[in-house]
């Protein structure tokens, strides 16, 4: 008997889940509210824990075509410019973990997963389909969504589509997940008080001395900046994260996490930092702004899966970006989901048991990574004595401290 998974959301998590479920022998119907599959223009770092999964899915070659593989991560003090520590990546990571450390444009990673789903699976992908009604019984889960025609923007809400039944529902619908609200009713995510300014540009547009093929993290009081190459090293991704809040008018639009912004506030926050860092930021004209939100970790496996419904990616564990593992955890979730659903041939296992196993094997790992991301942010943004201790420890312990 072939079972059917319904997936809410076609971001990196939803597409990874579609791949994993089809590889496990399930039929997949995926629903994405947007009119087309896309990702925002920003970079993403993928540790060997994630590239190993992509290797298992035969995506190593496709990743190599679009990613960069920096040879080291260097940490510098944002104010003094002093080098604080270096972690070898490149060959060192490959040798140690059997998988590389990659940096990639989010749209390229998303596209790579989408191409794999389209070309190598029978998954049905539905665009303009915003799931909003959910019910489950002992035998099935049913969803219903509003379907935008895609042709004209009407003032009326889009019409309801038909009810669709499946054996399992995977909520991969991100930070504001409607599936999560149906399951947990725990309200909106929390505003962290941190703002991310990001830029992505061809390195050829920068003066030679500002181009870079390494990951560099600049740590300063209440801020840090990370830069790394993507697209085979031809483009540079820069993210500056500063502690601060937007005014009420701008924060009304929180769920649009991709604001155009001028760089005045970032430049003001970086006043007093070293010249190379200011030169980099001043050389870039176009910045986008994310208001960073997260949620506290789930309290147990029963919150990540209930009956025939499971949460995956940011829907389950939206986290601060200080460990660069949010999408990584979504991809790890998908791999574990595939393992759990692959047990479908065992007649003793029903769908709720498979999803409960998935959740049991994931929730603590996700909670730990969420907690470590918060701790990392505190270390990155340390001031005064604490930052002195951090810098001394980085110099003393070097890569042992950096190897997260
Ligand atoms: P999303 O990307 O949010 O996808 C959810 C999808 O669901 C969207 O396409 C949405 O349109 C759709 N959807 C929502 N509601 C509905 C509905 N009702 N019906 C149908 N569709 C719906 N992670 C890393 O691994 N490495 C990094 O270096 C890294 N850097 C980061 C830097 C910053 C500044 C930030 C903010 C995040 C970073 N992350 C990083 C985290 C990463 O971006 C996210 O964790 C990841 O993109 C989450 O993917 P997702 O598919 O779970 O959710």
Image (spheres, helix red, strand yellow):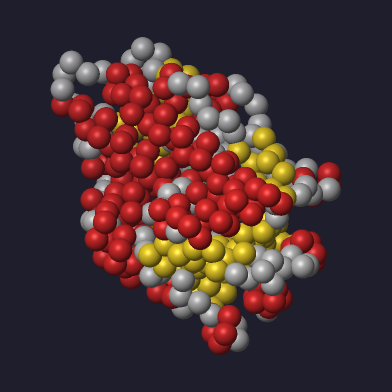
| Name of the residue lying farthest toward the bottom | 208
Q: What residue is drawn where x is 36% and y is 42%?
A: 332
Q: Is residue 126 above or below residue 399?
A: above
Q: In the image, is 14 to the left or to the right of 97?
A: right
The quarter holding residue 261 reads bottom right
The residue at the point 69 percent across, 66 percent down is 79
- Judging depth in this view, the residue of 258 and 88 nearest the camera is 88
Nearer the observer, 148 or 12: 12
Q: Is residue 33 rendered to the left or right of residue 384?
A: left
Residue situated in front as seen by the camera: 118 or 360? 360
Which residue in the rendered view is the most extreme toward the left? 346
Q: Give percent across and percent down for residue 96.
A: 26, 56
The answer to whether 120 appears left or right of 329 in the picture is left
161, above or below 35, in the image: above
Q: Residue at x 80, y 64 (%)?
A: 268
**Residue 40, image x, y percentages:** 56, 58
Q: Residue furthest top?
A: 138
Residue at the (35%, 50%) spot, across then down: 50
Q: Can residue 171 be seen in this view?
A: no
Q: Quadrant of the N terminus?
A: top left
x then y, percent, for residue 4:
30, 31
Name the residue nearer the viewer: 300 or 256: 300
Quarter assignment of residue 103: bottom left
Q: Position of residue 131 (x, y in %)?
A: 52, 34
The relative height of residue 397 versus residue 74 in the rendered view (above or below) is above
The answer to whether 165 is drawn above or below residue 96 in the figure is above
Side of 211 where 89 appears, left or right: left
Total marks placed: 0
Residue 22 in view (yes/no): yes
């Amino acid at each position: 008997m072939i079972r059917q998974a319904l997936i809410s959301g076609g971001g990196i998590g939803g597409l990874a889940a579609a791949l994993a479920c089809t590889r496990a022998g399930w039929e997949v119907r995926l629903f994405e509210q947007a009119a087309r599959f896309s990702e925002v223009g920003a970079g993403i770092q993928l540790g060997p824990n994630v590239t190993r999964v992509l290797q298992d899915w035969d995506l190593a070659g496709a990743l190599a075509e679009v990613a960069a593989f920096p040879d080291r991560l260097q940490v510098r003090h944002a104010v003094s410019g002093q080098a604080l520590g270096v972690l070898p990546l490149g060959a060192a990571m490959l040798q140690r973990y059997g998988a590389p450390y990659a940096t990639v444009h989010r749209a390229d990673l998303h596209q790579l997963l989408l191409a794999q789903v389209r070309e190598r699976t029978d998954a049905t992908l539905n665009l303009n389909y915003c799931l909003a009604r959910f019910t489950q019984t002992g035998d099935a889960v049913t969803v219903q969504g509003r379907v935008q025609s895609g042709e004209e923007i009407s003032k009326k809400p889009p019409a309801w589509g038909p009810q669709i039944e499946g054996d399992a529902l995977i909520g991969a619908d991100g930070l504001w997940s409607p599936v999560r609200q149906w399951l947990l009713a725990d309200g909106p995510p929390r505003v962290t008080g941190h703002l991310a300014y990001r830029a992505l540009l061809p390195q050829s547009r920068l003066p030679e001395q500002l181009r870079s093929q390494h990951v560099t993290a600049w740590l300063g009081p209440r801020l840090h900046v990370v830069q790394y190459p993507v697209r085979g090293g031809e483009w540079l991704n820069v993210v500056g994260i500063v502690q601060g809040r937007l005014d009420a008018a701008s924060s009304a639009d929180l769920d649009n996490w991709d604001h155009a912004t001028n760089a005045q506030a970032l430049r003001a926050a970086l006043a007093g930092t070293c010249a190379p860092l200011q030169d980099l930021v001043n050389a870039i004209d176009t910045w986008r702004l994310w208001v960073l939100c997260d949620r506290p970790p789930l309290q147990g496996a029963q919150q990540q899966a209930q009956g025939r419904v499971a949460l995956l990616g940011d829907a389950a564990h939206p986290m601060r970006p200080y460990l660069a593992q949010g999408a990584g955890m979504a991809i790890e979730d998908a791999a574990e989901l595939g393992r759990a659903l692959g047990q479908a041939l065992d007649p003793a296992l029903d769908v709720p048991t498979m999803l409960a196993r998935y959740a049991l094997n994931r929730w603590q790992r996700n909670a730990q990574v969420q907690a470590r991301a918060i701790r990392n942010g505190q270390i990155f943004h340390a001031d005064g004595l604490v930052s002195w201790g951090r810098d001394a420890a980085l110099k003393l312990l070097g890569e042992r401290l950096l190897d997260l």
